[in-house]
Amino acid sequence: DTGVSQNPRHKITKRGQNVTFRCDPISEHNRLYWYRQTLGQGPEFLTYFQNEAQLEKSRLLSDRFSAERPKGSFSTLEIQRTEQGDSAMYLCASSLGSDSKETQYFGPGTRLLVL
Amino acid sequence: GNSVTQMEGPVTLSEEAFLTINCTYTATGYPSLFWYVQYPGEGLQLLLKATKADDKGSNKGFEATYRKETTSFHLEKGSVQVSDSAVYFCATSDKIIFGKGTRLHILP
């Protein structure tokens, strides 16, 4: 399978704990995006990378959130001191190209529940 | 600010009915427009896209035309099937904004 993969698929944590999610994009894709999706809503853009450079961050991405893509391949999204409001599906997508007009290929998501 | 507005669901139709899901957008530039679909238990996948005004995207019998004058990208299908039951998202590449999604139920 050469699609976008995300791990873990599900995560339950207690409020105040740190969590880290991983995304493995399609191998030749240079762009990688993170989104958050809550029930009944569309995906909300969080941040994106072009290769290893983080080029844009949404105002939704508070200082408790950090994303990395150290070698321009896989990426991690860490949430520190989780809050109940962080409960959501976190989606990763990748694309090949130089702008956001290219088709994005989505992973299955990581569902986070903060108790 | 930029936004994408699509008709609220759920939309329930009988098999072979005609489908329209409305989508309008606001943008500062000339974005590409997309329809993504999420089938039950699966991830988001591209259904169709259009990159400039008057372009028509099409796939699996679905069509949408990029209308700059009305800032719209309505999704249509002439004869829906039960297998089309899913959630449909309209999106613009300008600031990467998705609509809230429209859930479609097709009854046999």
Image (spheres, coloured by chain):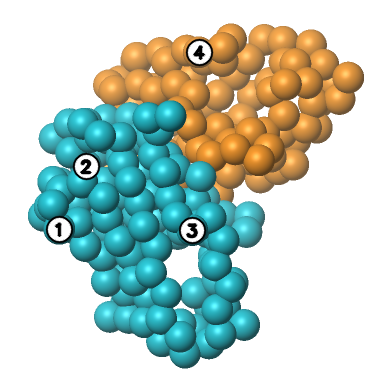
Give the mark toward the camera: 4 or 1: 1
Distance, label 4 to label 2, CA atoms, is 25 Å
Give the x, y percent position of residue A77: 33, 65
Distance, label 2 to label 3, CA atoms, is 21 Å
Distance, label 3 to label 1, CA atoms, is 19 Å
Mark 4 near mark 2, Cβ–Cβ under 8 Å?
A: no
Tint applied to chain A in the drawing:
cyan
Q: For mark 2, what is the residue? A: A31
Write down the quadrant of residue B46 in the picture: top left
Label 3: few (<14), some (14–19) or many (≥20) C-alpha neighbours in 10 Å: some
Label 4: few (<14), some (14–19) or many (≥20) C-alpha neighbours in 10 Å: few
User: What is the chain letter for disc 3?
Assistant: A
Q: Which chain is orange?
A: B
Q: For mark 4, what is the residue? A: B59
Q: For mark 3, what is the residue? A: A8
Give a yes or no on whether discs 2 and 1 share a subunit.
Answer: yes
Give the mark toward the camera: 4 or 2: 2
Q: Residue furthest front?
A: A1
Amino acid type of the residue that numbered disc 1 sits on in the rendered structure:
Pro
Amino acid type of the residue that numbered disc 2 sits on in the rendered structure:
Arg
Mark 4 near mark 3, Cβ–Cβ under 8 Å?
A: no
Give the mark toward the camera: 2 or 1: 1
Give the x, y percent position of residue A67: 26, 65
